[in-house]
Amino acid sequence: MTAKFRKPTEDPIWLKALLGGLAFGFIAVLLLLPLVLVFKEALAHGLSAFWATMTEPDTLAAVRLSLTAAAIAVPLNTVFGISAAWAIAKFDFKGKTFLVTLIDLPFSVSPVVSGLIYVLVFGAQGWFGASLADHNVRILFALPGIVLATIFVTFPFVARELIPLMVDQGRDEEEAAATLGATGFQTFLRVTLPNIKWGLLYGILLCNARALGEFGAVSVVSGHIRGVTNTMPLHVELLYNNYDYVGAFAVAALLAMLGLVTLVLKSLLEWRYAGELAAMHRH
């Protein structure tokens, strides 16, 4: 007598309920509860205290610096990610595996270590510190150092989103366009870019969220100058260490809202263009 075939999804209802309950429990305890507590503490003294923190000059300076660093780092990482993914997916060359390994390097290196590397290179006692000082060029404790640290920790996101997508799509369409006389730039704009636009957008959203929330590397190179080199995460730490808990949670709530905006945009894109995304994945 042969055993009755059972589909992999035909598990007992109690097992499904248990696994679903564990998943929702972890999400509630580790994600939703901290998020709710952040907003609760931020509004503990009312909207007036929250707004007072948001309009404080040091807070506004931190917001401007974070947005400026992200506005510089994200486009640069986008250009790098597209170029790296194009080279890896469309061409064969020696060192391709090594290039992929280098792209993954920021995922394995602590952000604090990457910040210390910039101190070693651009610091007063670093390799280029004396030369930079002679020409009155400031990298550390200024916007350039913060941008460099942000670029380092965020540059894998766009590339890592595009590489598997472009590898899966293959080279047939680009080769066909080339045989029809299209230039490399025309091929990219009319063939490659339409095929990768959603993966590219996801990578940009993730890169931007990471850039706004970066703490470790920026903390090392910024110098923690209040109102000058403090980004939003650093400003949260400063306020908390000064026992301004409402202010710290208010700025943290702003960071959380920016993260939620990123999540909402991603979800809206998935909902609005579900058909195109499914077609892209089938391709």
Image: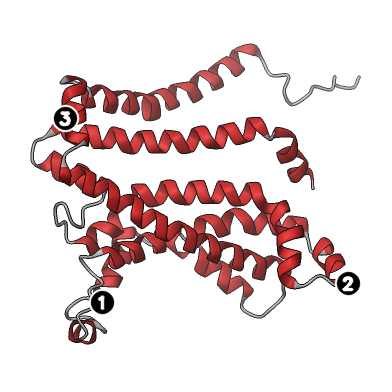
Mark 3 Cα within 10 Å, few/some/many (few <14, many 20+)?
Answer: many
Task: Locate residue 135: give its quadrant.
Answer: bottom left
What label does residue 1 carry, if any? none
Q: Nearer the viewer, residue 282 or 204?
A: 204
Earlier in the chain: of badge 3 and badge 1, it is 1
Quadrant the N terminus occupies: top right
Label 3: which residue? Answer: 246
Q: Where is residue 230 drawn, in percent x and y?
A: 21, 53
Q: Where is residue 136 drawn, in percent x and y?
A: 19, 80
Mark 3 residue element = helix
Label 2: which residue? Answer: 179
Q: Is residue 116 left or right of residue 56?
A: right
Q: Nearer the viewer, mark 2 or mark 3?
A: 2
Q: Nearer the viewer, mark 2 or mark 1?
A: 2
Residue displayed at 55% across by 50% down: 203
Please determine whether, in this image, residue 46 is positioned above or below residue 167: above
Label 2 – label 1 distance at C-alpha: 48 Å
Earlier in the chain: of badge 2 and badge 1, it is 1
Q: Is residue 230 left or right of residue 182?
A: left
Mark 2 residue element = helix
What label does residue 122 carry, if any? 1
Mark 2 Cα within 10 Å, few/some/many (few <14, many 20+)?
Answer: few
Task: Locate residue 186: give its quadrant.
Answer: bottom right
Q: Nearer the viewer, residue 229 or 280?
A: 229
Residue 108 visible to the viewer: no
**Amino acid under label 1?**
Phe
Residue 16 visible to the viewer: yes
Residue farthest toward the top in the current orientation of the protein: 13
Q: Nearer the viewer, residue 104 or 126?
A: 126
Task: Locate residue 43: give its quadrant.
Answer: top left
